[in-house]
Amino acid sequence: MKKNLFILFFIFLIFSYLYGQKAPKNVILLIGDGMGPVQVEALSYLKSGKPAVMTQFPYHGISNTNNLRDSITDSAAGGSALSTGKKTLNGHVATDENGNPNENIVEWVSRENNMGTGIIVTSHITDATPAAFYAHVNSRKEHEEIARQLVFSDLDFVAGGYLNYFLPEERKDHLNLLDSLDIRGFTLNTSIAEMNNAVAAKPFVMLSEKYPPKASERESWLQNCMYNAFDCLTRHTNGFFLMVEGSQIDWACHDNDFDHFADEILEFDKAVQIAYEFAMANDETLVVVTADHETGGMSLDPAIKKVKKKLVSQEVGKYVTWGTKRHTGKPVNVYAFGPGSELFQGEMENTDIYLKIKNLLNRKH
């Protein structure tokens, strides 16, 4: 009898855990492209020993980043795992190994929950990670097709770099995607001032016409875009999904360029802070921070712990070594704050992040 009571009590606890969490109305997913655990540790030293904002979130986990067949993923397969909940091959953008489209989270929340959706990136807007949230192609190199699919996507707010793939004089097919954007309700903004002064239903904010600038040259572009995204997306009464990528963390780590990395990850930390402050003011917002993979094989000399806090931010680079200029198969961190954040603990697959978000949003019904 006691054994049966114990089993019933255990089942009750499981159901309480699975179904007791409050469902979020809004979800902000921040991706530090290439940001492994050591990159996060380096961030705290860059802040003179102050903790990274994400590490102060109440729930932490670890995500495995392998793709469908290999231990080392690229951003296409890594981003697709986060956006679709399914692993795929390197180079594939939200498609399976046979080229069939896998529904992404932007499509799902738009169709099922009628939520507002947005993406903000510091790379090309048609780069692999952002593309996984609105396009379906078998090669991440199909930038012109990715741009065309963006125009007809479910996105309500778009911000990123590189306009050329939308210009008829730059495209091989000579399609004028700027006209198409206008027809689809997007308003193109080419500067922060233009964005701040516009009241657009669907802002399309360009960081640059050509190669996106580094964090040291962007000033407060990313932060401004986030504030504008909140203004735009909170008009949607059913909530919103917003993906923000610190894209050039990856670029800097590929180059083993510590100074560039430092600027990028410090900017990303500010973006996490903005998301956290929004969630603090709006208790229906879930914030999840993770990475698609680690880049550079970064390691820190333990001797850095002996450097005085007031000096350490200027000395970090001296204690960093790089193992490669490529991606690695290292697991990456997951941090969560807000309703449902307790689900993001322990070891998980990168696909689980999508599945946990989707399951939480399903509870709204």
Image (cartoon, grey):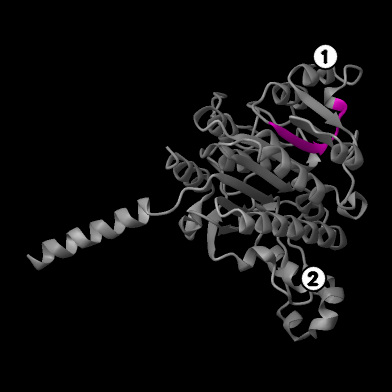
- Region of the chain picked out in magenta, as a range: 156-164
Residue 233 shows in the view: yes
Element under label 2? Answer: helix
Residue at 12% over, 61% down = 4
- Camera-nearest residue between 52 and 156: 156
Q: Going from the N terminus, do you reach mark 2 or mark 1 first?
A: 2
Is 160 on the left or on the right of 338, as rendered? right
The x and y percentages for residue 198 are 84, 34
Residue on which disc 2 sits: 46
Q: CA distance from mark 2 to mark 1?
A: 45 Å
Q: Residues within 10 Å of mark 1 (few under 14, many from 20)?
A: some
Q: Quadrant of residue 163?
A: top right
Instruction: Identify the amino acid type marked 2.
Output: Leu
Residue on which disc 1 sits: 175
The x and y percentages for residue 24 are 51, 48
Q: Is residue 189 magenta?
A: no
